[in-house]
Amino acid sequence: MLLGGLFIVSFIFTYQKRKVKTAQEIYMLKESFNRTLLESQLEIQEQTLKNMSQEIHDNIGQALSLAKLNLFTIDPSVPENLITKLENTKMLVSQAIRDLRDLSHSMNTDFVEEKGLVQSIRYELEMISKASRLETHFDISGTVFRFDKKL
């Protein structure tokens, strides 16, 4: 009987140790997952900011610099060049505004919610094509449906 009691106490003690060890392992796994998730989020955020700054520099900055150059090189004594330079400047400023609008749309999560995932993917592929001169293709098979906002 004493041996049976000792066995039960030993079994309970071993069970409790395993339970504590398992709880610690689960806690460590959760912490590791949260750390990895945070690192991934930071990496995505850094890449997004890098892409934004490159887009601003390459497209918007270039268009505005050319518009400024056009304005500074206007010679009022040559009226035939005046209209051409002003038209070119208007075109460059309009392009900069479109590029800025496109950039802000790509950052706006409400845009995805409003337009849907398919349209948003098409839009992003168009932006990639414009920015990098890559040709992209987007094919859909099956039925298109809207995801829940959180998804």
Image (tube, rainbow, N blue to C red):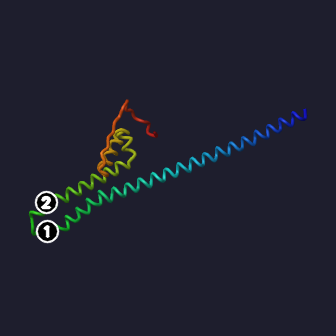
Q: Is residue 34 above or below residue 143?
A: below
Residue at figure coordinates x 12%, y 60% from the top left:
83
Label 2 and label 1: CA atoms lie apart by 11 Å
Q: How many marks?
A: 2
Q: How far across and how far down the image is residue 135, in percent?
A: 30, 45
Q: How far across and how far down the image is residue 9, in percent?
A: 83, 38
Q: What's the residue type where badge 2 is placed?
A: Thr
First along the sequence among labels 2 and 1: 1
**Mark drawn on residue 84:** 2
Q: How far across and how far down the image is residue 50, in percent?
A: 40, 56
Q: Which residue is mark 1?
A: 75
Q: Quadrant of residue 20?
A: top right
In this rendering, position of residue 61 left or right of residue 6:
left
Q: Secondary structure at mark 2?
A: helix
Residue at figure coordinates x 36%, y 40% from the top left:
114
Q: Secondary structure at mark 1?
A: loop
**Mark drawn on residue 64:** none
Q: Quadrant of residue 112?
A: top left
